[in-house]
Image: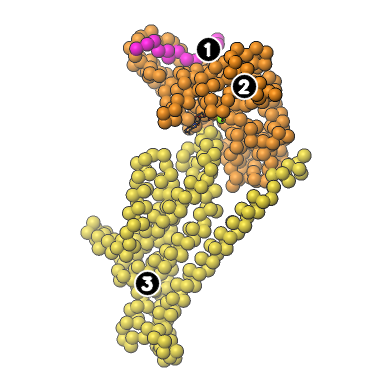
Amino acid sequence: MIEQILSLQSWMTFLADWKLFAQAFGVTLMVSVLALLLALILGVFFGVMSTSSNPVLRGIARGYVETLQNTPLVLQAYVFYLALPYIGFMIGQISVGIYAVGIYHGAYIAEVVRAGIQSIPHGQAEAAASQGFTYVQTMRWIILPQTVKIILPPLINQMVNLIKNTSVIALIGGTDLMNRTNDWATTGECIYGPPFLVCGILYFILCFPLATWGRNYEEKLKRRDVHTTDKPAAKEAEGSAS
Amino acid sequence: MRDPCVLCRVVLLTNNFLQIPYIGTCRLVLHGRPQYFQTLTFQDGVCVSMIKLSHVHKFFGPNEVLKDVNLEVKEGEKLVIIGPSGSGKSTTVRCMNGLELPTSGQVFVNGVELTRKNRTELVRSTSSMVFQQFNLYPHLNVLGNLTLAPIKLFGKARKEAEELAYHYLEVVGLTDKAMAYPTTLSGGQQQRVAIARALCSQTKIILFDEPTSALDPETVQEVLNVMVKLASESITMVIVTHEMGFAREVADRVIFMDYGTILEEGTPEHFFVNPIHDRVKQFLGKILY
Ligand SMILES: Nc1ncnc2c1ncn2[C@@H]1O[C@H](COP(=O)(O)OP(=O)(O)OP(=O)(O)O)[C@@H](O)[C@H]1O
Ligand SMILES: [Mg+2]
């Protein structure tokens, strides 16, 4: 493998097929975006539901989260792939991948959203109730907007994991980046080095900037919190007003 | 506390459904003892009862926090509630806007019984609240805090809502802080913004739960001044406070709560001059000197 990476010949062979890889990279990108969208919708929906005062709603949300978090993603992908045709859904491997990854990460995002909502002081919901906001209005206009900042770092962590986990599609035979790489490498001349290296780099350039941005944002939040608690902003404002 | 008898129930439900204030006394003894469904006070055929708690009991787990509280607040009345910590003052006030629902008994607001089902709409149109901890929305600036309910709940246009907000900011003397975020304001300023926010709902009732207890002694007065100003208007105010000077100035009536009951009731003067119970004398002695 090391020799192949150093061998100009194998790189030439690999690069001749670059279009195949570009296309597969596009598939991975598309799957990531769509699965993320699905995961966000499910995550906010079930996250809000798990903070409801209604025990049935809470139970449903708990069931979803626990089931999806405590079984392997690979198993879930296989189940979706093999079981969906039985109940009349004929969908391609790529779509199965989007659903499987989206639903799986939806469960994690639901937990992130729940923790975020619960970190907002209860006085906020009480103030909203005293003004006559309904539960949904309270979430929409008062609680969730305050939650966004807090949950952004763990949410980005989930995005990075989601991108990497789209590679589960390779196992059910969808042509994403992982599958294309493996396929290309194990057929014909069996050139492993260049495709796997490039595959890794492509995932890396998707994930690394995202993860870095998330970490920097978190640092910024922390610094700002220290800042506001150290500085007696209230006292200062008081002085300037009088 | 037992539920009203079958007949009372039917009358209550019918009136409630039709949103008619009702009056009358149940003479039946179906439920073991005479039960009154007569509740609201009328003057010249008009219901003047703004808030009424009727045989309200509230349990938190095994603790009975309110024990048969009966209380009527008339339209425009300024009622001050005092009493030692844990006596149920907050719980009483929170029953008036559905933040707590009584375990048994009834709450009427503006002639309508407050229930789990109607509390959001009823509260929206009749009352607002000012909290000890201000509870301003930190993600919105002062103007945003003031216009959120008018825009989202009362369907006002942004421009109209902002005019309203500036009007009430002027009342509390903070027009220059319209664009500031709550965390950059002092406690006294935050509480004045919270009062302006309550005013922006233009409700007949404003409930205050220890509005000055979280403030520095120097800033207490600026908030009290605003409240004195409000008291000259027709708003019905229920105020939990230990500021007896303020109570003397604005209150029509003071009630003293102890262990979940109303122990003594009277004018502010009555409490200053000749309170009946030793418990009350003792308590006033502590907070006045
Ligand atoms: N949500 C709750 N769950 C359990 N117990 C509660 C709850 N809210 C209040 N209590 C209890 O009910 C009692 C009365 O509380 P309440 O807050 O009404 O008293 P208070 O007169 O307002 O006192 P304070 O002056 O300290 O505010 C207290 O013993 C309190 O511990
Ligand atoms: Mg209290």
Asked whether, in this view, residue B237 is left or right of residue A61, the answer is right
Q: Is residue B36 magenta?
A: yes
Neighbourhood count class around disc 3 (C-alpha, 10 Å): few under 14, some 14–19, many 20 upward: many
Which range of residues does the magenta coloring cover?
Answer: B32-44
Amino acid on which disc 3 is placed: Asp
Q: Chain of mark 3?
A: A
- Colour displayed for chain A in the image of the structure: yellow
Disc 3, SS: loop
Give how far across and how far down residue A240 sits, in percent: 76, 44
The chain that appears orange in the image is: B
Neighbourhood count class around disc 2 (C-alpha, 10 Å): few under 14, some 14–19, many 20 upward: some
Identified at 37% across, 83% down, the residue is A192
Residue B121, can we see it?
no
Asked whether, in this view, residue A98 is left or right of residue B112, the answer is left
Q: Which mark is residue B42?
A: 1
Identified at 37% across, 40% down, the residue is A55
Q: Quick check: do tags 2 and 1 share a chain? A: yes
Q: Is residue B248 above or below residue B86?
A: above
Quadrant where the N terminus of chain A is found in the figure:
bottom left
Q: Chain of mark 1?
A: B
Give how far across and how far down residue A167 sits, in percent: 37, 69
Q: Is residue B160 magenta?
A: no
- Whole-number angstrom distance, CA of label 2 to CA of label 3: 75 Å
Mark 2 or mark 1: whose residue is earlier in sequence: 1
Amino acid on which disc 1 is placed: Phe
- Whole-number angstrom distance, CA of label 2 to CA of label 1: 35 Å
Q: Is residue B8 above or below residue B214?
A: above
Query: Label 2, on which residue?
Result: B283
